Image: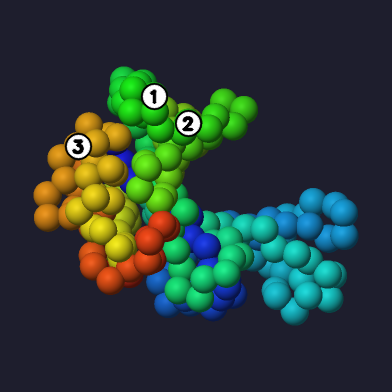
């Protein structure tokens, strides 16, 4: 089981994207959106000024470094909030998590067999993936860089950590859950619902 992804929502998409690329060394995978009524995807070779001239409307910006994938989506919050955290699971871990979710009456959304989202009941979701070839390729980079800690600011850290851990069959301690070397930690002072991104540690 590995944490490899998190999805941020913010009104400052360009600034947040620039932080990951310029300060942290992430690569821009692509920007996804539309031009007029047509879907459009642009890579790193096309700058924001060119996109503005084309009338591009951003839906998602995807960034990647080592075994870490981050998506930034336009939204109403200046400080980025986490919509979901993505995990790579074994087949058994995946089945167990879905069984736990359904037993607890949590919402499970499956998108064409490609992505499965599970509500934690605590204001955010988990994106769960069974073994996939593209994930194996991404996680092969774990020796180079992976997410050591994801720190999230929340209104009720203990409750959010417990909800996160229970769904995955893991124990929460001191408002934190350890997932194969990655600590997902919740701290005081955040909003209700989706937690705010507070800090990251890459190893």
Secondary structure, mark 1, is helix
Q: Which mark is residue 108?
A: 2
Label located before the other in sequence (2 or 1) = 1
- In the rendered image, which residue does mark 1 sit on? 102
Real-space CA distance between mark 1 and mark 3, rounded to the nearest whole angstrom:
17 Å
Question: Within 10 Å of the Cα at label 2, are there few (<14), some (14-19), or many (20+) other Cα atoms?
Answer: some
Q: Identify the residue shown where x is 56% and y is 75%.
A: 12
| Residue nearest the observer in this picture, 12 or 102 | 102
User: What is the spatial separation of the Cα atoms under label 3 and label 2, in whole angstroms?
Assistant: 19 Å
Is residue 4 visible in the rendered image? The answer is: no
Residue at 62% across / 28% down in the picture? 112
**Residue 110 falls in which quadrant of the image?**
top right
Q: How is the image coloured?
A: rainbow
The answer to whether 180 is drawn above or below residue 192 in the figure is above
Q: Residue 21's spot in the image, x, y percent?
A: 50, 71
Mark 3 = which residue? Answer: 170
- Indicate left or right for 82 with 12 as reference: left
Picture layout, residue 80 above or below residue 31: below
* Residue at mark 2 to residue at mark 1: CA–CA distance: 8 Å
Decide if residue 40 is in sight here: yes
Q: Please state which of the two labelled residues, at mark 1 or mark 3, is closer to the viewer.
A: 1
């Amino acid at each position: 089981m590995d944490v490899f992804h998190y999805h941020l929502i913010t009104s400052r998409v360009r600034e947040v994207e620039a932080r990951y690329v310029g300060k942290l060394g992430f690569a821009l995978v692509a920007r996804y959106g539309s031009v007029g009524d047509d879907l459009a995807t642009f890579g790193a070779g096309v700058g924001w000024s060119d996109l503005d001239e084309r009338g591009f409307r951003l839906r998602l910006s995807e960034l990647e470094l080592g075994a870490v994938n981050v998506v930034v989506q336009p939204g109403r919050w200046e400080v980025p909030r986490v919509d979901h955290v993505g995990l790579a699971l074994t087949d058994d871990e995946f089945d167990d998590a879905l069984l736990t979710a359904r037993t607890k009456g949590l919402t499970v959304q499956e998108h064409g067999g490609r992505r499965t989202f599970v509500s934690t009941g605590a204001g955010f979701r988990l994106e769960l993936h069974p073994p996939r070839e593209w994930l194996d390729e991404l996680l092969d980079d774990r020796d180079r860089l992976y997410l050591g800690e994801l720190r999230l600011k929340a209104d009720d850290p203990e409750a959010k950590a417990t909800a996160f851990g229970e769904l995955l069959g893991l124990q929460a301690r001191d408002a934190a859950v350890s997932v194969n070397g990655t600590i997902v930690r919740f701290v005081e002072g955040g909003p209700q619902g989706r937690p705010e991104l507070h800090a990251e540690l890459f190893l």
